[in-house]
Amino acid sequence: MMASSYPNWHTFRDNAILHSAGEPGEPDASKGCKSGSVGRGWSAWETKSRPLTRHYFLKSLLGSNYAAPIDYPKRILDVGCGTGIWGREMAHAFPDAQVVGFDIEPQTPVSHALEVPSNCLFVQGNALQGLPFANQDFDFTHQRLMVAALPARAWPYVVSELVRVTRAGGWIELVEAADTFERIGPVTKKYMEWWHKLESKTGFDASLMTKLPTLLIKAGLSQVKDRVLQVPLGTWGGRGGELLAKDLHAIFVNLKPVYCSQLKLSEKEFDKALNALPQEWETYQTYFHFYLAYGQK
């Protein structure tokens, strides 16, 4: 399962849905997804606070950093750890555990104010090439927001790797975004048509995230549970909805070169639709879905 097997993987991952990039800011963790200073302007939030804001948004949405019924894990793995903030918080929550973050990018400080706990370390590598850990090495294996990092045909293999490195009786948990909207208008519908055409060219399939329980069951897990997390999209849904709308809109902005080149769209056509999206989400009171699933080995 080599990355070179997927020629569009790096371009798609670097520009697509929910990819953490840049050095984050320092929102107040105690305020959940309402943290972060949007008052500084969209540009400042986009470049500094976006990864952390996203983390606290998901934490608030779930009510915790995890949903699986873990007790006192000794070894915790976070695949696709990004900034590493999830692993750092888990290291503080479970001081007797060793927390390992794994990502294709070199690990960089999430904030100068947030030091790496002594029981937290980071390993660089490519999940498409397998996880560099022994069989049954971890009590809890976590992976989230990898929809734009893993081509559709790689998911069964990657999930099998998550299972392989988890001990018998341990838990595996996935949290993902898909391509599911509710109450959509004509512009959002057009974007989703473009999105699906783009996926057919790149080998990605966000709709696969709606089938996370099936992936876990086929990988041999038991006691599989799942949740659909329905989130308002736009200021009509409060602060969280406002931030999510900005995040998704920024994703479409970042994907403009890919859309226009791969689908032969004119910049004028793309920009016209792009500019209409935020108001449409407000008018239709659109919802966006996240998906969670976990199971026991």
Image (cartoon, rainbow, N blue to C red):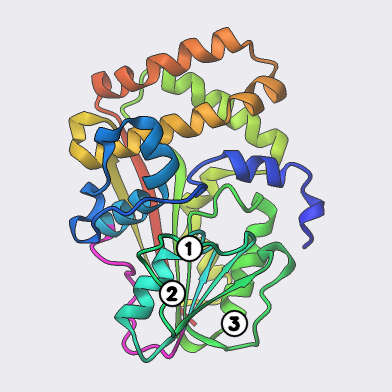
Query: Secondary structure beneath disc 1?
Result: loop
Q: Is residue 289 left or right of residue 156?
A: left
Cα gap from disc 2 to disc 1, whole angstroms: 8 Å
- Magenta residues span 62-75
Q: Nearer the observer, disc 1 or disc 3?
A: 1
Residue 109 is tagged as 1
Cα gap from disc 1 to disc 3, whole angstroms: 26 Å
Q: What residue is drawn where x is 49% and y is 82%?
A: 297
**Relative to residue 109, is residue 6 depicted above or below?**
above
* Quadrant placement of the N terminus: bottom right
- Kindly check if marks 2 and 1 are in contact, taking CB atoms under 8 A apart as contact: yes
Callout 3: few (<14), some (14-19), or many (20+) C-alpha neighbours within 10 Å?
A: many
Reply yes or no: does residue 220 show up in magenta. Answer: no
Query: Secondary structure beneath disc 3?
Result: loop
Residue 148 is tagged as none
Residue 229 shows up from this direction = yes
Front residue of this view, candidates 200 and 239: 239
Cα gap from disc 2 to disc 3, whole angstroms: 24 Å
**Mark nearer the N terminus (1 vs 3):** 1
Q: Is residue 112 left or right of residue 217?
A: left
Residue 242 shows up from this direction = no
Residue 12 is situated, as x and y percent measured from the top left of the image, at 65, 41
Residue ID for mark 3:
165
Q: What residue is drawn where x is 54% and y is 55%?
A: 146
Q: Amino acid at mark 2?
A: Val
**Relative to residue 43, is residue 76 depicted above or below?**
below
Query: Secondary structure beneath disc 2?
Result: loop
Residue ID for mark 2:
116
Front residue of this view, candidates 4 and 167: 4
Residue 152 is situated, as x and y percent measured from the top left of the image, at 64, 50
Q: What residue is drawn where x is 45% and y is 22%?
A: 189
